[in-house]
Amino acid sequence: MSSPVTDPHALRLLRSMMGGDLPVISPRIGYNVTYPRVEEVAGVTADRAQDLLKDLTEQGYLNRNFSTMVYRCPFDNTTSLRPRLICPVCQSEEIERVPLIEHMTCGHVDQEKNFVKGELLQCPNCGKTLNQIGVDYRRPGHAYYCPTCGEYSPSPIEKWSCNAENHVFEMEEAVAEKLYTYTLNEAKRDEVSKVFGFIEPVREAYMRCGYEAETFQMVTGKSGVAHLVDVYAKKGDVKPVTSIARILTDKGIKPEEVLKHYAITLDVEVTKPILIASPQLDKASEAYMDQLKLKVIEGSNFKTIIEEFEAFVCEQ
Ligand SMILES: [Zn+2]
Ligand SMILES: [Zn+2]
Ligand SMILES: [Zn+2]
């Protein structure tokens, strides 16, 4: 696969992130984990949205930050789970957590509601009225009461269940997965901006002249070094015409950039190396370009640049 930023879906997503419409991409956890904003903005399916985020992160366009953990049913992968508390005596799931009272006078322990007699508390065992907490009765805490078998348990058996198919399993059997939020890697902002502003139209100009052209292409030179060029284009099979376009959009482009362009040009041996410098090279750089007889297209008018560029790459 070519660089993800040539994928129109990825471009749509990055454009929204750069424009501030979608500064952070967050997961939504329902029966499954989805990224609805990505689906909407990039125009992709839920599965493709996940792949897109993964690819863009691997390629450095997005940063990811830990968001939360999800646990999946080990049988069907759903993320919609609930705890299932079970009576350890009879296995019934119909148990409830109740407050307890201990009648210290006779030692009877029961749930609070069995002591309530109108306004008073009365022991269901010995029939005496309870007077003062800490003196003749106390509250020892809570227990789980099972109406099926009538037993109290300090703690129930804890299992988990999925809401999709009611599969029952231990929490440790659930499949844990880290979820992330995603933001634009600001270090890539310029590179991506170039795609929108210049690179894609440059690639299109090559294609109008009959080239096959790829953006952000790694081109290996005779030295064995791979150079990342903005656009690499090739036409014909027998004696192919090859071209690279490097695009610089900084103010006052310095000689180092020209020398780098020259070095790449020598190494990759292309027929038509082109440097697009917008708005222009500085004086020293211009002198280098003349000396080295390298093609440079300068200007601040984007339309004019593309016209001049197209005229140059189309001529045989
Ligand atoms: Zn029970
Ligand atoms: Zn009692
Ligand atoms: Zn399940």
Image: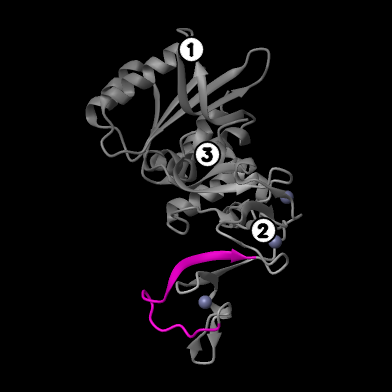
Q: What secondary structure is found at the residue carrying circle 2?
A: loop
From the viewer's perspective, is the residue at label 2 or at label 1 nearer? 2
Q: Position of residue 81 (x, y in %)?
A: 64, 55
Q: Which residue is mark 3?
A: 56
Q: Is mark 2 within 8 Å of ligand 1?
A: yes
Q: Which residues are magenta?
A: 127-145
Judge from the rendering whether residue 241 lies leftward or rightward of residue 67; answer left or right: right
Q: What secondary structure is found at the residue carrying circle 3?
A: helix
Residue that protrudes farthest toward the top in the picture: 223
Marks 3 and 1 close (CB-CB < 8 Å): no
218 is higher (above) or lower (below) than 128: above
Residue that protrudes farthest toward the right in the picture: 165
Question: What's the residue at 68%, 12% (across, down)?
Answer: 238
Distance between mark 3 and mark 1 Cα atoms: 27 Å
Which mark identifies residue 87? 2
154 is higher (above) or lower (below) than 315: below
Q: Which residue is mark 1?
A: 221
Asked which colour scheme the image uses, the reply is: one colour
